[in-house]
Image (cartoon, coloured by chain):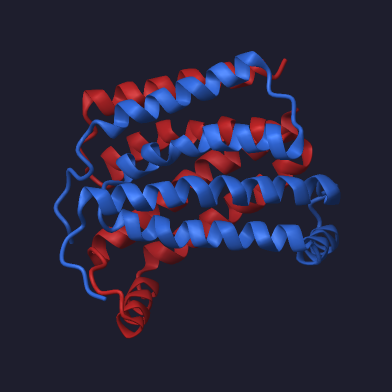
Chain colours: A red, B blue
Amino acid sequence: MANEIILLLLIVVAGTGGELCVARTMQAVGPATDFRLAALIQLILRVLRIGWMWLGLLLMAVAFFSLLDMLSLENVSFVVPVTALRYGFGAAGGKVFLREQVTGKRWAGVLLVCIGVGLVLIGKR
Amino acid sequence: MKTSASSPSKIYLLIVLMVILGPVGNVLLGKGMKRIGAATAWNPVELLHFLEMLSRSGVIWLGVACLMAFFAVYMLVLSWADYSYVQLASAMAYGMVALLGHFLLGEVVTPLRWAGVLIICLGVLVVGHTPPRTTEQG
């Protein structure tokens, strides 16, 4: 059980951290508007020049391998919903790290997601 | 092909793609990992052996391909909408995972777990009624 808790924490914390870093990268790069191959390659090269992207990829790799290990221990219909806990971290991280304005309505959505995750956890027993 | 603006319909379409690709990828990974089993130790030799087994599984590769496609779509959406919006809107995928796990993998999903998944989706709907972007584009 301790192993599963550690894996869950790694999935949630490293996964959210990685996504925040990638989101920060995309904010810096700006919106994609040109979908020609040359433009897309240029966009990828611009993205890869940003340090946040590499940190994001590293954190997401940690979360990915933790997810794989967790999937070998538990059912996918349990593991994936439980990882929704990252939405709480995500909304908080979006507000603090990316300066997004998370409205009361969005927080209400986060609360519902967290209650849903709680039920999924209880439903396992 | 050149587009001038990120319309809400484009964002919704890409989120639908995310909701399909992510769960299918996760279900394939779950199927593959059930066959391979857990990593028994964290020393380098065991980890290399674990990675070798992963690399030999076609189902795992297919799952990874789906998740890579999911990631590409996700990056695109992130350049158009807020992280906290996209992340929550894509939570619809949790309902899809429970459905696929039940019908494709034969997993037992208790009524309480279904209720949890339903409330997660409800939370997503609440978020869907908030503006997609609250920050200036870079």
Question: Residue B101 placed where, x, y %?
Answer: 68, 36
Q: Nearer the viewer, residue B118 or A47?
A: B118
Identify the residue at horizontal 47%, vertical 45% (top origin). B19
Q: Quadrant of residue B84?
A: top left
In which image quadrant can residue A81 be found? Answer: top right
Res B37 visible? no
- As drawn, A43 above or below B18: below
Marker count (numbered): 0
* Residue closer to the observer: B45 or B108: B108
Q: Residue at x 45, y 35 (%)?
A: B92
Q: What residue is drawn where x is 20% and y is 53%? A: B7
Q: Residue visible at 31% across and 40% down?
A: B85
Side (left or right) of B99 relative to B128: right
Q: Is residue B58 left or right of residue B77?
A: right
Vertical placement of A25 versus A47: above or below? above
Classify A74 as above or below A58. above
* Residue B21: image location, x then y, percent: 53, 52
Q: Quadrant of the N terminus of chain A?
A: top right
Q: Position of residue B56 (x, y in %)?
A: 81, 66
Q: Is residue B128 above or below residue B17?
A: above
Q: Quadrant of the C terminus of chain A?
A: top right
| Viewer can see residue B53 | yes
Which corner quadrant of the image does residue B106 belong to?
top right
Extreme residue in the bottom direction: A38
The percent position of residue B41, horizontal first and vertical second, equals: 83, 49
